[in-house]
Image (spheres, rainbow, N blue to C red):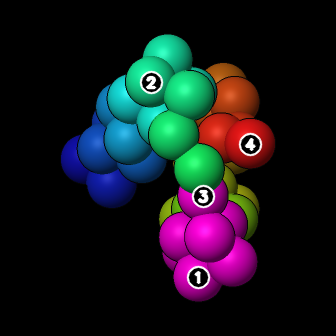
């Protein structure tokens, strides 16, 4: 469930060209480490 949520969150950030602050990036990275079988494109 968390992997799917983070994937959606990253997609919204990327498609909306929304910024990501350091705390969001750290949270994304932490959750992404637990999603080895889910392709996650990091928001920029």
Asked whether the beta carbons under mark 2 and mark 3 sit within 8 Å of each other, the answer is no
Note whether residue 2 is visible: yes
Magenta span dominant secondary structure: helix
Q: Mark 1 against mark 2, which lies toward the viewer?
A: 2
- Identify residue for label 2: 16
Labels 4 and 1: the sequence-earlier one:
1
Report the residue that reaches farthest toward the left.
Answer: 1
The CA distance from mark 2 to mark 4 is 11 Å
Q: CA distance from mark 3 to mark 1?
A: 8 Å
Compute the Cα span from label 2 to label 3.
Answer: 11 Å
Q: Earlier in the sequence, mark 4 or mark 3?
A: 3
Per the image, label 4 sits on a secondary structure element best described as: loop
Residue visible at 38% across and 41% down in the picture: 9
User: Which of marks 2 and 1 precedes in the sequence?
Assistant: 2
Q: Is residue 37 visible?
A: no
Q: Residue furthest top?
A: 15
Q: Position of residue 11 (x, y in %)?
A: 47, 25
Q: Tag 2's secondary structure?
A: loop
The spot of residue 44 in percent (x, y) is: 74, 42
Q: Where residue 10 appears, x then y in whole percent? A: 50, 37
Residue 20's disc number:
3
Q: Residues within 10 Å of mark 1 (few under 14, many from 20)?
A: few
Mark closer to the chain start, 2 or 4: 2
Magenta span = 20-27
Circles 4 and 3, Cβ within 8 Å, touching? The answer is: yes
Identify residue for label 1.
23
Q: Which residue is mark 4?
A: 44
Callout 1: SS: helix
Question: Whole-Å distance between the Cαs marked 4 and 3?
Answer: 6 Å
């Amino acid at each position: 469930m968390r992997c799917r949520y983070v994937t959606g969150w990253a997609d919204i950030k990327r498609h909306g060209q929304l910024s990501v602050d350091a705390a969001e990036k750290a949270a994304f990275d932490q959750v992404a480490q637990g999603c080895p079988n889910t392709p996650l494109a990091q928001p920029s």
